[in-house]
Image: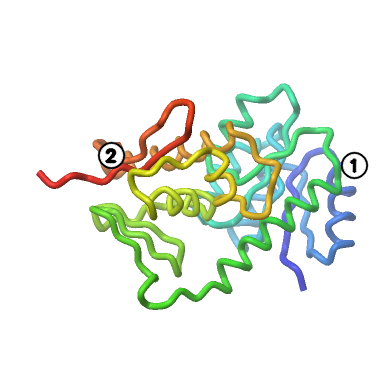
Amino acid sequence: MNGNVAIVEDEQNIRDNVGFALKREGYQVESYPDGHAAWEAFETSLPDLVILDIIMPRMDGLELCRRLRTLSDTVPIIFLTSRDEEFDRVLGLELGADDYLCKPFSMRELVARVKVLFRRLSLINDRAPSEEEELLSIGELTLDLRRYTARWQDRTVPLTVTEFMMLHALVRRPGHVKTRQQLMEQGYPHDTYVSDRTIDSHIKRIRKKFASLDAGFDQIETVYGLGYRYTEVLES
């Protein structure tokens, strides 16, 4: 049986069509007409993946995303947005969404993206690193490659799976520049839809999370025109 998908969308026609398409692929589906109804359900039981509209009554998608990330950093979130909502789209990614689609969208494309995110979760759950590669440490940063968790100065950094995969790509070769395309391939290994702006938003969110623990964190360096690199902390 495939995973459980929550559709949070105030337009019933979209809810019904998306639900029908996902059920046809074997997914379990729960639908909610607004963020408040979805939040009440999520407090009791979390879905495996959330498809989330931004503009809704009672509680909008951005607020629901913010609250959902207080419960889980790993549940994938796909935003549905209008084409003229670029600011909201970027803000959604900064709040922890994994992907987004602009309305009107292709149902086939939405289903494909859902499959990508579930496949990625499956790879993570099935992965069993050897003892030698379970932990990757550089300076004050430690990545647990089995649990997909990060610690900075022995404090947990609450990263989403996408953020962890991008950080891992940078950290495993410190000092080397990773292009946005390379980070895209690491964070979305089965996807070809992600834009450079999406990568930048994820990097900004990673930096913000580390800065909340250590205001002096500046290890992720922007290499203008190329991409990003992780710099080692030099011993004084």
Checking the image for residue 13, the label placed there is 1
Q: Is residue 137 left or right of residue 23?
A: left
Expressed as whole percent of the image width and height from the top left, the position of residue 180 reads 53, 38
Q: Quadrant of the C terminus?
A: top left
What mark, if any, has residue 200 been given in the picture? none
Residue at (25%, 58%) from the top-left corner? Answer: 154
How far separated are the C-alphas under marks 1 and 2? 46 Å
1 or 2: tag closer to the N-terminus: 1
What is the crowding at mark 2: few (fewer than 14 residues within 10 Å), some, or many (at least 20)? some
Quarter where residue 92 is shown: top right
Residue at the (28%, 55%) spot, across then down: 138
| Location of residue 86 by image quarter | top right
The furthest residue to the left:
236
Query: Is 181 placed left or right of 226 in the picture?
Result: right
Q: Residues within 10 Å of mark 1 (few under 14, many from 20)?
A: few
191 or 9, nearer to the observer: 191
Q: Is residue 151 above or below residue 62?
A: below
Q: Residue at 73% x, 38% y: name it.
A: 101
Q: Looking at the image, is 124 positioned above or below residue 155? A: below
The residue under label 1 is which amino acid type?
Answer: Asn
Between residue 10 and residue 131, name the one nearer to us: 131
Callout 2, which amino acid? Phe
Residue placed most toward the observer, 228 or 45: 228
In the picture shown, does residue 144 fall above or below 212? below
Q: Position of residue 74 (x, y in %)?
A: 54, 57
> Residue under circle 2?
217
Q: Nearer the viewer, mark 1 or mark 2?
A: 2
Q: Which quadrant does the N terminus fall into?
A: bottom right
- Pinpoint residue 61: horizontal percent, then vertical percent: 65, 38
Residue 120 in the image: above or below residue 187: below
At 35% from the left and 67% from the top, the residue drawn is 135
